[in-house]
Image (spheres, grey):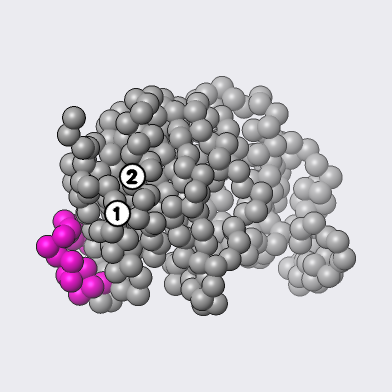
């Protein structure tokens, strides 16, 4: 049997600093048949010059800037492979990455997506660091795991190898989802609904943490995640599931907190109210009440809360995690 072709899609927007390492990590793969597709999404820096160094070893797609999801779609539409891998411009792979994943897809036709463990590299500190979320358990996202995936998205874009047949069945990234937010999560959910997932426990991917990962609009991210999950829970009649109700309550709690941090008390109240509808809690009731106070007083309360010893979470404090372009 002929070795399957794997198409690799790298969307690039102003990635001159790191895209060469991403490209070289694909070219160094031990899997013998790899098609590399680089989508230049209207870069205004020297990305085109960097990509041109590898012109004879990749397929280049040029388009005006339309965002990373549209760039991924353009690459996946061009892909000729039986399997399709995604790699973000600032990450890179271990040489055995595709080979380890392809073996799992070849061994079981029920599997539509294989993801892997990740290592994290802090570019500014020039050192390896621990996981962004120490509580994450991506190894549990295997087999028929649609419901578990609804509880949290722990799959990094750059870890994924997809069966092209699965993409043909469920479609590509949904461009009606706003911003660079949860288009990937939506795609994983659609695949997990119809296909099984598999996992490589060794870290085959390096996620680079750096200061130029793009603008992360936390409120938009949380809002689009909530909108996605509201729709999916309604479609799947899962609105009475206690764990999923708790998940939605936490999500609206976080969104309310993000609005409160931004000084938008009205939107904060709306989202705290929505959190309470999913699952009542004394904490969210308190935050809902706080949202009626003048902003200067809210800032004082936040500062006092953050200084409390042993506090679990600052009032309406946004996450310190970097922009999730690769999640």
The residue most toward the left is 56
Quarter of the image with the N terminus is: top left
- The answer to whether 127 is drawn above or below residue 114 in the figure is below
Q: In this view, does 114 lie to the left or right of 21?
A: right
Where residue 61 appears, as percent x and y from the top left, is 18, 57
Residue 48 is a magenta residue: yes
Work out whether residue 148 or residue 27 is closer to the camera in this orientation and state it.
27
Span shown in magenta:
47-64
Residue at (76%, 51%) from the top-left corner?
288
Where residue 244 appears, as percent x and y from the top left, is 64, 33
Where residue 283 appears, as percent x and y from the top left, is 81, 49
Q: How many marks?
A: 2
Residue at (73%, 68%) from the top-left corner?
295
Tell me the CA gap for discs 2 and 1: 8 Å
Few, some or many residues within 10 Å of mark 2 (<14, 14–19, 20+): some
First-in-chain label (2 vs 1): 1
Q: Give the residue at mark 2.
A: 99
Residue at (83%, 60%) from the top-left corner?
311
SS for dot 1: loop
Q: Which circle marks residue 254 in the picture?
A: none
Q: Looking at the rendering, which quadrant does residue 91 occupy?
A: bottom left
SS for dot 2: helix
- Whether pointer 2 and pointer 1 mark residues with C-beta atoms closer than 8 Å, the reply is yes
Few, some or many residues within 10 Å of mark 1 (<14, 14–19, 20+): some
Where residue 128 appears, as percent x and y from the top left, is 55, 67
Q: Looking at the rendering, which quadrant does residue 187 occupy?
A: top left
Q: Give the residue at mark 1.
A: 29
Q: Is residue 1 visible?
A: yes
- The answer to whether 213 is drawn above or below residue 220 in the figure is below
The residue most toward the top is 237
């Amino acid at each position: 049997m002929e070795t399957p072709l794997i198409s690799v899609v790298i969307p690039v927007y102003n990635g001159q600093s790191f895209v060469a390492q991403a490209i070289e990590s694909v070219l160094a793969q031990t899997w013998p048949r790899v098609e590399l597709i680089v989508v230049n999404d209207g870069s205004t820096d020297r990305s085109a010059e960097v990509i041109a160094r590898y012109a004879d070893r990749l397929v280049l797609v040029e388009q005006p800037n339309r965002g990373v999801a549209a760039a991924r779609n353009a690459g996946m539409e061009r892909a000729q492979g039986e399997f399709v891998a995604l790699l973000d411009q600032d990450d890179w792979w271990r040489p055995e990455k595709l080979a380890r994943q392809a073996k799992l897809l070849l061994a079981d036709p029920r599997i539509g997506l294989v993801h892997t463990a990740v290592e994290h590299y802090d570019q500014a500190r020039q050192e390896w660091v621990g996981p962004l979320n120490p509580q994450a358990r991506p190894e549990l996202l295997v087999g028929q795991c649609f419901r578990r995936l609804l509880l949290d998205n722990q799959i990094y874009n750059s870890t994924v190898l997809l069966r092209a047949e699965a993409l043909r069945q469920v479609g590509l990234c949904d461009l009606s989802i706003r911003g660079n937010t949860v288009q990937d999560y939506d795609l994983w959910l659609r695949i997990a609904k119809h296909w099984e997932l598999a996992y490589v426990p060794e870290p085959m991917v390096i996620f680079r943490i750096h200061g130029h990962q793009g603008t992360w609009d936390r409120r938009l991210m949380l809002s689009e995640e909530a909108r996605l999950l509201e729709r999916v829970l309604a479609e799947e009649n899962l609105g009475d599931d206690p764990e999923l109700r708790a998940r939605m309550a936490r999500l609206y709690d976080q969104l309310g907190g993000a609005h409160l941090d931004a000084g938008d008390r009205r939107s904060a109240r709306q989202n705290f109210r929505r959190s309470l509808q999913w699952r009542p809690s004394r904490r969210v009731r308190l935050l809902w009440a706080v949202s009626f106070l003048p902003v200067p007083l809210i800032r004082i309360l936040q500062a006092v809360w953050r200084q409390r010893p042993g506090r679990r979470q600052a009032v309406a404090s946004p996450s310190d995690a970097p922009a999730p372009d690769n999640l």
